[in-house]
Image: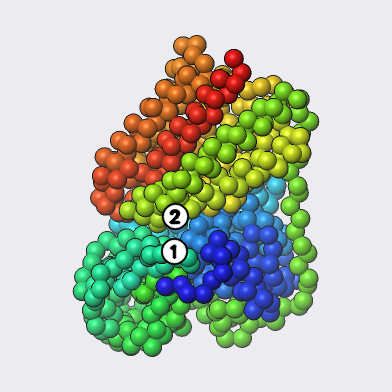
Amino acid sequence: MTRLFNDPAAFADEMIEGFVAASRRWVRPVPGGVVRRNRPAKASVAVVIGGGSGHYPAFGGLVGPGLAHGAALGNLFASPSAQQVYSVAKAADTGAGILLTYGNYAGDVLHFDQAQERLIAEGIPCQTVVVTDDVSSAGPDETAKRRGVAGDLVVFKVASAAAEAGHPLSEVARVARLANDRTRSFGVAFTGCTLPGADRPLFTVPAGRMGVGMGIHGEPGIGEQDVPTADQLAELFVATLLRELPEGVTQIAGSRVAVILNGLGSVKYEELFVVYRRVAELFTAVGLEIVDPDVGEFVTSFDMAGASLTLTWLDRELEEFWRAPADTPAYRKAVAPVEPFVDTPGVVIADAVIREATPESRRAAARVVSVLEAVLGVVERNAAELGRIDAVAGDGDHGIGMRRGAGAALDAARDAVSRGAGASTTLVWAADAWADRAGGTSGALWGAALRSVAAACDDITTPTREQVTAGVEAATQAIMRYGKAEIGDKTMVDVLLPFSVALRRGTDDGQSLAESWDRAAAVAQTAAESTADLLPRKGRARPHAEKSLGTPDAGAVSLALITRAVHAVLASEKRATP
Ligand code: ADP
Ligand code: MG
């Protein structure tokens, strides 16, 4: 239960405001998140972390000397947008390049990758290390697909200490990668979590039972068993983590390890200590040397009751960086380095430009607004159902995310039109707002899709059916390029590709846009229903593939609904203009 909130929609922003007010010694707010209050006087690699809100102290609480230089802070359980990551990175940059590092979730990867592309295009060196420590999210042969959980702290800490020591970007990225390769985590949960204002938990665990391998967004676990005693849980944790030695580690006895026992939100520190007592005994019994263990909350999942154990196999280099001092709102170690005070200059993100548009294209831009009104309408009417479908194997936020994205896109489009924008520019504004505000995987993909449609149009003529068809084709290519999903992976691609093919067929047969769109929307509807028979191979639903059999894909369903709603607008225009 989350008890204290005002407007649930404002929760994340208000939480960040309060966090900043309480943490001025370490951080200052910038667009998209926070950066360290004091800049290092000497240029050093800036380690930029981030993710959704609801995981405190990840991510804002881990910014300060010895740890991260900046954190991009997304909405509740939604990745920060590419714009947010970019803006935080710009503010954190001191001229020696940027390391982006964060937990492996599809939405985060899309947004951070786009931010990286943009930084590199501006000549700012930037590398990425994605954290993949959760052993229950994929097998040992697919470690790159694993989710990132409390192992985040080790990777962030090691990377930041290397940056602090003055190492160049390539070195900082190398040790961060090494830390990730040598870190394993495993978690359990006793209850689900309830987001502010929600009337029920995102998921539940039956009373007296324990979800094994549960994700920090409430992704369902891989198994379930009775709640064990504290000692039995310690034994399960230790046995699981010792089963898989990372490459380069040849023996257990005599190895030196960092250990984190992490509470996921509403397990008491006292309970954690009871568990840790047995963890330490067991590790010591097999000859492990524990270095600077941490017991407490480091990466949480709102008010979820649960815990995870993280083990990092240290070498000389990793140990030096793990033990180095740090001083952040939520994490302190030894004496922090004293930094000479240098004021952080504010960042200014240039206002998007409105290109000159013809009256013809401005009329088309007004129709773009009508289309977006229809999109928001259909998303709002179906938001609860989309959330329910997404919760079956994903995290239940698809309705919320689509509503945020479509609403922001509509606002931005109206704003653009009021400033005299043409069709293409209006679509660009809508695309950027959607990607920036929606968060999540689908936010990044819808942003990319709308940008492709924008690129197929211009600010001079009324978009022709050929332009719209080519725009939809380009959007399909863009989504497949960014998301790397193919037909049959149980994503929105399973609807978009057949929709785009059907639209092309109609256009080439000489049908009007409204006619061919009508047929294509029918194809989309059938394709969305058929995703119920597929097993997800992309996105956060993948580890829980079998649970989703019989339920269609949330992103596929929303796309089909939207194509139908857009048709209604196209058809009514046709009637209005004979
Ligand atoms: P998140 O998964 O970050 O919570 P949403 O819930 O808003 O984001 O969107 C989930 C939908 O995104 C899925 O139902 C699927 O249709 C789509 N999706 C996820 N990953 C991909 C991908 N790699 N390519 C295309 N679509 C994807
Ligand atoms: Mg989701």
Q: Nearer the viewer, residue 108 or 127?
A: 108
- At 41% from the left and 64% from the top, the residue drawn is 199
Does residue 166 appear anywhere in the picture? Answer: no
Q: Earlier in the sequence, mark 2 or mark 1?
A: 1
- At 54% from the left and 71% from the top, the residue drawn is 5
Residue located beneath label 1 in the image: 198
Q: Is mark 2 within 8 Å of ligand 2?
A: yes
* Badge 1 amino acid: Ala
Residue located beneath label 2 in the image: 397
Residue at the top extreme of this rendering: 510
Q: Is residue 123 left or right of residue 295?
A: right
Residue 28, percent from left and from top = 69, 70
In the rendered image, the vertical position of residue 207 relative to residue 488, given as above or below: below
Quadrant into which the N terminus falls? bottom left
In the rendered image, the vertical position of residue 498 relative to residue 246, given as above or below: above
Marking on residue 211: none
- At 35% from the left and 68% from the top, the residue drawn is 192
Q: Is residue 99 left or right of residue 214?
A: right
- At 71% from the left and 43% from the top, the residue drawn is 415
Q: Secondary structure at mark 1?
A: loop
* Badge 2 amino acid: Asp
Q: CA distance from mark 2 to mark 1?
A: 11 Å
- Structure colour scheme: rainbow
Residue 406, percent from left and from top = 55, 44
Does residue 401 appear anywhere in the picture? Answer: yes
